[in-house]
Image (cartoon, grey):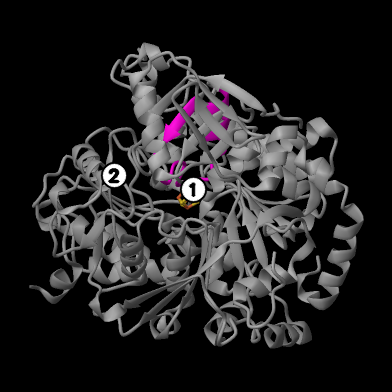
Amino acid sequence: MKPRTLPRTLYDKIIDSHTVKTLDDDGHVLLYIDRHIINEYTSPQAFSGLRDQNREVWRPATTLAVVDHVNSTEPERVNFSPDESGANQMKYLAENCEKYGIELFDLLDKRQGIEHVVAPEQGLVLPGMVIAAGDSHTTTYGALGAFGFGIGTSEIEHLLATQTLVYKRLKTMRVSINGALGFGVTSKDLIMAVIQMIGSSGATGFVMEFTGSTISSLSVEARMTICNMAVEAGARGAYMAPDDKVFDYLQGKPRAPEGPLWAKAVEAWRELKSDNDAQFDMQVDLDASTIEPMVSWGISPDQSSGISGVVPSAEQLATYHEKTAIEKAQKYMDLSAGTRFADITITHAFIGSCTNSRIEDLRQVAEVLKGRHVAKGVRAILVPGSSLVRQQAEEEGLADIFTAAGFEWRQSGCSLCLAMNDDVLRPGERCASSTNRNFEGRQGAGARTHLMSPAMVAAAAVTGHLTDVRKLVRGE
Amino acid sequence: MMMEPFEIVSGIAAPMLDANIDTDVIMPKQFLMGVDRKGLDRGVFFDQRFVADGQPNPDFVLNEPRYTDCKFLLTGPNFGCGSSREHAVWGLKQLGIRALIGTSFAGIFFDNCMRNGVLAAIVAEQDLKDLAGIVAENPGKPTTVNLQEQRISISGQIDLSFEIDELRKQTLMTGLDPIGATLQHRQEIVDFEQKHLQANPWLAD
Ligand code: SF4
């Protein structure tokens, strides 16, 4: 590996400052990890590995465990999984946390929620940190100027035992987004447009730095949506340089530093940015003012388009892979080329997931739902990202709007984002969803998913078909 | 934990050349509910491999008699994208898959393969096409993957090279436990940690 001289990207700086040891000339380093989040379903075999080898956890205080994937989200909170094996995973997680001294937010904890909503909410994600978790959407933490990435179970075990990972440096991509977002267009639409543009493997092997006036104008929560979904373009990490909005967001959070330590930290965090003339391996530019609300029509997150469009035809596409992918998607989704999105009717509307279930998302949903009602024949479900988000939404009166509109108002968890609990769609059902993946079978075998922003899901829920939220709100 | 070392492996290769085959498809959610790694071979491609009553789906490629004992998959771009679930790789391994041969793999899946002794070999697009063509025309003829030499061949018909970085290659060839290897640097980690927490005191426990 050539020695890294100035100027450097923020990614390079963070990796350099966490490198325990360079392992070879190929870019492999032993990387120190500051924080580790675990859940009930990707961690059990990692703990079994530790137990089998009689290994200790290196630094238990850096790990937080959260139950989120298998639990019920029924309105009444109960401390069990709807399923025996899920209950077993929860029990094993609790036993492991107890044995190794790891903090656990279980279902009855008022801070419980989806791991990627909970960790920032608690102030556990700080600028400049390196964070790993056994979940691909760990990229979310980049919105706070941290570097987060997903790992498999073997690496969870490695991290628990050594506080490090054997890590290979990624290539760097800078995505510059400038211009004002139009009315009704959100950060979800932005990231869906980026994924559509570069493809679902367009950022494979890369870390993405998002920059530009549009990014600066977004709230921290809106930025999280972007970093969260960057993995759907294949990125193994995504981040934005931290700014005052990030520091304001963090100040006073339960686990954020306080007093003199806070001042010292902010001083250091202000240095966290790419050098002016830092070189990126790839550059992507986007004019935010050209983006309209997006919807996905296929079975890969890059198969999407602006709401005013139609389902594309395979003939328009050049390569064999693109053609077969389109045909496969249309067959699974039961859509034919030329169908207008506005003519696609839905059976379900789902608002939730680590992409879009924070309080700002819920406020946007309430804006659309106020004075409106879910269409006949549509089942509409809202699952807040954390128990604290749920509480806040109730305090702000949002929950009343949701229930008055005919939405089910649930407890927190991953729920229909991956349908590992009892929230599962049946074959042929079609869901407008604020989640991140429209894969075959993701919300239930044979079920069909259309990704979009929370406001767009709300609009589809009240009309019964995919709908341009801008027209609905303006009464067009 | 020791992994099964990978040196030279011969066997049948099966084509799965669609783009973006994700880990939800490779290992559906109902197989993620365990606390161990058992029984995941049944879960691999479950929704496509089996029809409603649990019988094999005759239209699914891995159910074709010529591919039922395959050791290699020829994979389309971005294979293994999506969820980090290592269950996908555990299942493939339990099904007897030793190597995936494709043009690109998703990042987490790629790492998970290495950690389980499954080779993810990156080949040029044209080489993959040629290999898939020869495999299709020669049922029952074995493909040989030689990791040391970084070659994939079908005797008398094709012999091509693949890419892998040295660290992955060594890990796969030796099958040694990476945690044990890292813990050899224990003192360096301790020293680093101490300096790191001093420089960033807000990160201390
Ligand atoms: S909400 Fe969905 S994407 Fe996020 S952690 Fe849960 S299952 Fe994964």
Real-space Cα distance between discs 2 and 1? 17 Å
Count of marks, rendered view: 2
Q: Position of residue A125 (x, y in %)?
A: 63, 68
Residue A60 appears left or right of A271: right
User: Which label was assigned to residue A321?
Assistant: 2
Against A61, residue A329 (above or below) is above
Task: Give the residue pinned by disc 1.
Answer: B106
Amino acid carrying mark 2 in the image: His
Query: Quadrant location of the C terminus of chain B?
Result: bottom right
Q: Going 45% across and 72% down the picture, which residue do you hit? A: A223
Instruction: Report crowding for label 2: few under 14, some 14 to 19, many 20 or more residues within 10 A (C-alpha).
Output: some
Please check the rendered image and state whether residue B73 is part of the magenta-colored stretch, yes or no: yes
Q: SS for tag 1?
A: loop
Instruction: Report crowding for label 1: few under 14, some 14 to 19, many 20 or more residues within 10 A (C-alpha).
Output: many
Q: Can you tell which quarter of the image residue B18 is in?
A: top left
Question: Which chain letter matches label 1?
Answer: B
Q: Where is residue B184 in the image (x, y as percent from the top left)?
A: 88, 47
Q: Give the range drawn in magenta.
A: B72-94
In this view of the protein, which residue sits in the foreground, B152 or B94?
Answer: B152
In this view of the protein, which residue sits in the foreground, A30 or A462?
Answer: A30
Please check the rendered image and state whether residue A32 is part of the magenta-colored stretch, yes or no: no
Question: Which chain letter matches label 2?
Answer: A
